[in-house]
Amino acid sequence: MSAKRGDPIYGVAVGAGISLFSLLRVKPKITGAENIPDTGGAVLAITHFGYMDFALTEWMVWRKNRRHVRFLATKAAFDKPAVGFLMRGMRHIAVDMSAGAEAFRNAVYALRDGEVLGVFPEGGVNASFTVRELKTGAARMAAEAGVPIIPVAIWGGHRLMTKTAKSSFAKKFGVPVHVAVAPAISVSELDDAADVTVALHSTLQALVDDLQVNYPVDGTGQPWQPAHLGGTAPTPEEAAAVEAARQARKKAERAERAAASTKR
């Protein structure tokens, strides 16, 4: 299934992204693009090291076969007026963290309808730049919809914008962005989602390892390079501790808002 009718906003958004990447002279290199199906539903399970990963994935798939990728995104993004307008216009799927069943059903419906769904199984942006433990959602929705999982690793995109490795606008010019797409992982409802997720993690980490080793820029001493390769990014343990503290803080803030709403 290619681009659907009624998606003019998607085309405009992709065009804007292409214009931005062209302005920045981003240098893309994609291996395994033939693994992206031209028709039928599929779950793209993507590494998440930078905030531009979704746009880079859309760009990559658009270049390959003009298909549209639907992403799962937090409801908070949809609640923002301008961003929400774009998200709805591009037919992405809102995820309410306190009630995820509806988003799961909508995702499975889209997959059965022949859509390509973009998922970041690590959850939020990973500051250690190594693949952390994955959530099982990608495996479960692929199994229920009867579609394959396509592992996708992106390296270099985090140098454009990420959580901890800040860079000046000038340093974003000419950044090499390398993408590796692995062959599809077939999933059925008879498979254990946890086992599939472990296999997916191994595949994604192997893709990332290869991209990092062959990246044309030396990251020694750089904040965008993982610690085990000589960079100054947080270790997986340090990044996990920071993320846990952030999640605890957000949970407390939600509880405070709920309590305040009850008192009104």
Image (cartoon, rainbow, N blue to C red):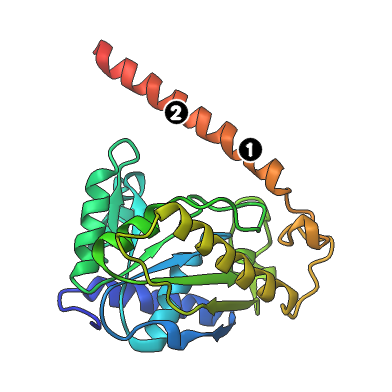
Find residue 197 and report its horizontal and vertical position in percent: 47, 57
Residue at the image position 47 percent from the left and 56 percent from the top: 195
Residue 174 seen by the camera: yes
Q: Is residue 185 left or right of residue 210?
A: left
Crowd tier of the residue under label 2, counting other residues whose Cα lies within 10 Å: few below 14, some 14–19, many 20 or above: few
Q: Is residue 159 left or right of residue 105?
A: right
Q: Quadrant of residue 116?
A: bottom left
Crowd tier of the residue under label 1, counting other residues whose Cα lies within 10 Å: few below 14, some 14–19, many 20 or above: some
The residue to which callout 1 is attached is 242
| Disc with the residue nearer the chain's start (2 vs 1) | 1
The disc placed on residue 2 is: none
Quarter in which the N terminus is drawn: bottom left
Q: Residue furthest left?
A: 5
With respect to residue 105, does 260 lie above or below?
above
The residue to which callout 2 is attached is 251
Front-most of residues 107 and 2:
107
Secondary structure type for disc 2: helix
Find residue 11 and report its horizontal and vertical position in percent: 29, 78
With respect to residue 39, does 246 lie above or below?
above
Gap between marks 2 and 1 measured at Cα? 14 Å
Quarter in which the C terminus is drawn: top left
Find residue 211 and report its horizontal and vertical position in percent: 66, 75
Front-most of residues 165 and 60:
60
Front-most of residues 88 and 179:
179
Q: Amino acid at mark 2?
A: Lys
Find residue 249 and report its horizontal and vertical position in percent: 52, 28
Q: Quadrant of residue 204?
A: bottom right
Residue at the image position 80 percent from the left and 63 percent from the top: 229
Q: Residue furthest top?
A: 263
Front-most of residues 118 and 145:
145
With respect to residue 128, does 161 lie above or below?
below
